[in-house]
Amino acid sequence: MAAETMQEVKIEQAGNRFAHAWRALRHRNFKLYIAGQSISLIGTWMTRLATSWLVYRLTGSALLLGVVGFSGQILTFLLAPFAGVWVERLDRRKLLVWTQALAGIQSLAMAALTLAKVITIHEIIVLAALQGLINAFDMPGRQAFLVQMVDDKRDLGNAIALNSSIVNLARLVGPALAGLVIAWVGEGYCFLIDGVSYGAVIGSLVMMHVKPLELQRVPATMLAQMKEGWSYVSTFKPIRTILLLFAVISLMGMPFMVLLPIFAGKILHGGAHTLGFLTGASGVGALASAVSLAIRKTVRGLTTMIQLAAAMFGVGLILFGLSHVLWLSMLLMLVVGFGMMQGLAASNTVIQTLVPEDKRGRVMSYYTMSFVGMAPFGSLLAGTLAHKLGAPHTVMITGAACVLGSLWFTVQLPGMRAVMRPIYEEMGILSKTE
C-alpha cells in the first residue's frame, strides 16, 4: 500500500513538473500567438529549404547560395538599430500585423514566379532582400512584444522556451514536408503554402486583447535614442558579452545552413529529401534543447549554459565536416541543433530579464543584429570559403571559431556574474545569502 502511495506521489510530481513547463500558456494572448505561429512557422521553414534548393538547382553554386543568404539578411543588419527605436514608438501589435502581411505577399510573389517557371537568381536575390527589410522591423518587434503577451514576468523565460519549441517543431516538420512537396510538385508550392500560412499569425494578433503600453513621447531625435541604446549595450558588461559571443557564432557558425544543400547533394549523394533529413535532424536537437529550457524554473545557471552550448555547437560542426555518412551526419546535426538553440534561447532569456522596459526595443534590435545581422557576412564568407576550400573544410573552420568564442566567454563569466548578481537579488532571483 505504501509503495502504491509513493508511486502515486511520483506520478503527481512528474505531472506537476510537466504542467510547470507549459505555465506561460495560461496567458490568453500568448496562447493565441503560439497557435498562429505553429502554423505559420511550418510555412516559413518550407520556404527556407525550398529557396536553398531552388538556388542550388538553378546554379549549382556554393558562392551564390552565400550571396542569397547575404542579400536576405544584410538589410536586417543595417536597419535593425533604426527599427529598434521605432519599435519603442509604435504599437507593437499593429507593427507585427503589417510585417506579417508583407512577408506573406513576398512569399506569394516567390510562388507566382516559380510556378510560372520564369524565376531567375536575380529575382530570388531581390525578394530575399525584401524579406530582410521586413525582418529588420519584425524581429525586434516580435521580441519586445513578447513581454506584453505574458503578464507575469516570472513566466517570461518559459514563454521564450515555448516559443523556441514551436520554432523547432516547425523546423522539424517544415523541411521534411518541403522535401516531399519539392519532390512531388516543385519548390513553387512550398512558397504558396508559406504565403497562405501567414494568415494564421495575423489572425492570432488581431484576436488578442493587449493592454497598450504607454508609448514614449520623447523630444530626443531618433539618432539620439540610437546613441543612448548603443551606450547602454556597449557599457553593460553582461549584455555586451552575450551579444559579442553571438555575433561571432552568427558570423562563423550559423551559415552552415546555407551549405547544407552542398552536403546533401555532393557529400552525401542525395537530393531534396536528404536536405530535409539534415535540416529536420537539426530541428530535433533544437527542439530537445527548447523543451529542456521550458522545464527550468529559474534563469539561474543560464550563463553557464550559454558557454557550454557554444562549445557544443562548434564541436558538432567540426565533426559534421568530417562525416561522409548520412546517419552520422544526421546524428551530428542533432548535436549542432541542440547547441545552437540552447545558446540562443538562454541568451535571449538572460537579456530579456536584465533589460529595462524603456530600452527593450533598442536592445532587442542589437540582439537581432548579433543573431541575424551578422549572418549575411557569414553566408558570404561561408560561400566564398566553400567555393575555394570545399564545404566540409569550411564548416570545420567555422566550428573551431565557435569553440574559441566559448573559451573567450568563459574568461568573461566572473565579471558578468558580479554585475548581474545585485540585479538578480533585487528581482528576488537570488538571495543575499547565496
Image: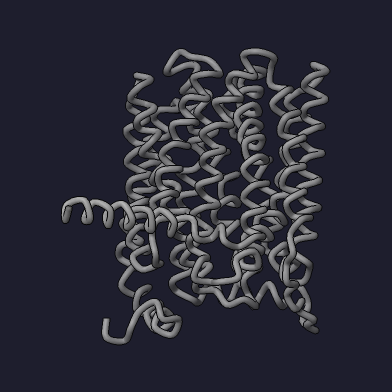
Residue 359 placement: quadrant? bottom right
Q: Nearer the viewer, residue 395 or 329?
A: 329
| Residue at the front extreme, as displayed | 1
Q: Find residue 37 and report its horizontal and vertical position in percent.
A: 64, 46
Which residue: 83% across, 18% down? 116
Q: Find residue 375 and report its horizontal and vertical position in percent.
A: 56, 46
Q: Is 196 situated above or below 220?
A: above
433 on left or right of 297: left
Q: Is 168 situated above or below 86?
A: above
Q: Find residue 237 and report its horizontal and vertical position in percent.
A: 44, 74
**Visible residue check, residue 249:** yes
Q: Find residue 139 and report its horizontal and vertical position in percent.
A: 65, 55
Q: Is 67 situated above or below 136?
A: above
Which residue: 31% across, 62% down? 410
Residue 210 placement: quadrant? bottom right
| Residue at the left extreme, as displayed | 2
Residue 175 placement: quadrant? top right
Q: Is 344 situated above or below 267?
A: below
Which residue: 39% across, 30% down? 393
Q: Nearer the viewer, residue 71 or 127?
A: 127
